[in-house]
Image (cartoon, rainbow, N blue to C red):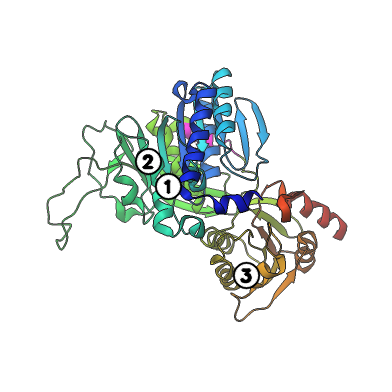
Amino acid sequence: MKNFLRKLTPDFLLNWYHFGWALLGAIVYRFPSKQLKVIGITGTNGKSTVVSLISQILEETGYRVASLSSIQFKIKDKIWPNTLKMTMPGRLKLQKFLRQAVRAGCQYAVLEVTSEGIKQHRHQFIDFGTALLTNLTAEHLESHGGFDNYRRAKGKLFQKIGHQGKTIVNLDDPSADYFLQFKAAEKYGYVMNQKDVVAGAFLFATPKGSPFRTRPLLRKGRDPQRQPLLVKRDAPRIIQARNCRVSRKGIGFSIEGVDFNLNLLGRFNIANALAAITIGLAEEIPLAKIKLALEKIKGLPGRLEIVIKEPYTVIVDYAHTPDALEKVYQMIREVFPGRLIGLLGAAGGGRDKWKRPQLGQIAEKYLDKIVITNEDPYDEEPRSIIDQVAAGLEQKQAQKVLDRRQAIRQALKIARAGDIVIITGKGCEPWICVANGKKMPWDDRQVVREEFGKIH
């Protein structure tokens, strides 16, 4: 009934409805964000990881921090899981969370900000002091009506910063220039790709020894070695990772001679770490303290989490977009020997149907054995979703197993010593969402342990 009424309601009335709830929430809880330094993390992938990393940096520096992500809620030492099946809570819940953070004496609030949340005005009446973009790839295209609208929705977070706050952008992302155009008191960028940085280009009166550099503005058609170096007045200060390396033990890189060795897997986590490091530097935290904080992290729940190590490796990850899935598969191929067995699916509810065959194509490209199963079907027919993912396969055959537990068991039975089993789509999510708004308790990691125990 709720969905039926929503379809009948004109867009402008829904827009005012969501805005009204946002205003009401702020009034009821007395605009709590005005008493906090609020950092908003947006993008397609990596948001939860960056929230966790920057929270760790701030806490290790001595600040009292509240954080909110798709994984968990945290206010100082109190942690509880996010069981809402939505990253950003509703307007009242979000403002209540911020008020609780104020009462607990928090100085910072680090929030994961989604395009769907922005679309429903959940970001309104929150005084964001910093906005960061991790990356932008295709997602929620049907909901937003195309990629440009999706990007514009993300941009609304940056619009809120204005002349008082800070914006931070991943300069390796194709949409970087779009987000750098928004006004801010301070702009920062981070980069892994050396071609984006020319040594010797400094921003204004950058202190000696600062890791920040500016990106030069070069005249088109001119030899960059012979033309004068031009620097835009509002060019971002840039932090760059050098000597990047990945292995089965983690990732490493250096920034201005400070060497980082982190217990995180995958080259894309170098970018996530850079995002958190740049926020830390923007908050005037020394690199040495940032290094100390990040090197204490032992991994993140449901994000390339190794659940079983012997006789084969089983990894659980949240990846559910084509870009994220491909990066996960690439990472495993880069550092793990042995066959790669993958279990994947796709969410229902009419969400991003276009990506389903793409997920199948990516699986075929990287996996030796493929199991396609149920994920979060909502009100869609699960078998139809599985068939749409399988439609992307041209050469290889996939095993289609409707029951996710049985699918996990099947993937484990296929595996031999030295193989890698990668289970994607849910990470540490606590539910499977089925028809009529029902939720089934679930945890991929726990099911893996249970089924592994039955087999071995």
Quadrant of res 421: bottom right
**Disc 1 versus disc 3: distance between alpha carbons?**
28 Å
Whole-angstrom CA distance, mark 2 to mark 1, is: 7 Å
When the figure is inspected, residue 247 is found, relative to residue 262, above or below; the finding is below
For residue 248, side relative to residue 123 (left or right): right
Tell which residue pokes out farthest to the bottom in this image. 395
Q: Is residue 435 visible?
A: yes
* Element type where label 1 sits in the image: helix
Residue 153 screen position, x and y as percent: 42, 48
Determine the image quadrant of residue 352.
bottom right
Q: What amino acid is at disc 3?
A: Val
Q: Which residue is mark 2?
A: 158
Give yes or no for contact between labels 2 and 1 (Cβ–Cβ under 8 Å). Answer: yes
- Tell me which secondary structure the magenta stretch mostly adopts: helix
Residue stretch rendered in magenta on the structure: 290-297
- Residue 145: where, in percent of width, then height? 45, 59
Which element type, helix, strand or loop, lies under badge 3? helix
The x, y position of residue 393, in whole percent, is 61, 76
For label 3, the residue is 389
Q: Is residue 340 above or below residue 166?
A: below
